[in-house]
Image: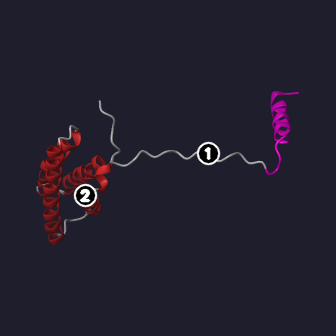
Amino acid sequence: MSCEAVAAASMLWLASWGGAGDTPPPAPAVAMAPASPLTTEPLFADIVARAGKLRTEVLDWKGKPLPGPAFATLKGELGELAALDMKGHVTLKERGTDGDLKCILRGISEDLPLKLKAVEEAANPSARDAALTDLSYLLRDNVEVITAPPAPPV
């Protein structure tokens, strides 16, 4: 008898031991890491919502000419977001938070105007799309650094 035949016969024999109604117990649920407690605070929830919305808009403009009035609105909204990021930095600094988040928020606040300027000054559509991609990454990071679960101290 070949090995394949023995394996098939063994499989059939083992399968016959279980009853028709026997089902394996459900797998335990995977525990999700708790979200950052900052997400429940109005300031940080506002930053997350605005950055997510703006990222969607920025990604929609890739490969298209920038619409004048809508781009002017975007500039204003990015300025407001940068101010909120700086406010988040100051809030965490005043709390005495000893973490990277306060520094990251400050950096994002300072980088948003630079990324916007790169979009405005792009020499051609390809360069503008690259600048829009960079801006979208910064906006994604703005969301992720706030929503990330707290990390243990290093």
Task: Give x and y (percent) for residue 18.
Answer: 82, 43
What's the CA distance linking mark 1 and mark 2?
37 Å
Q: Closer to the observer: label 1 or label 2? A: 1
Viewed as shown, does residue 48 lie left or right of 90?
right
Nearest the viewer among 20 and 73 is 20
Q: Report the disc number at residue 27.
A: 1
How busy is the neighbourhood of tag 1: few (under 14 within 10 Å), some, or many (20 plus)? few
User: Start and end of the magenta stretch?
Assistant: 1-21
Q: Is residue 115 magenta?
A: no
Q: Which residue is mark 2?
A: 51
Query: What residue is at 14 percent from the left and 61 percent from the top?
Result: 80
- Magenta stretch secondary structure, dominant: helix
Residue 64 picture quarter: bottom left
Residue 39 picture quarter: bottom left
SS class of the residue under badge 1? Answer: loop
Give amino acid for label 1.
Answer: Ala
**Going from the N terminus, do you reach mark 1 or mark 2 first?**
1
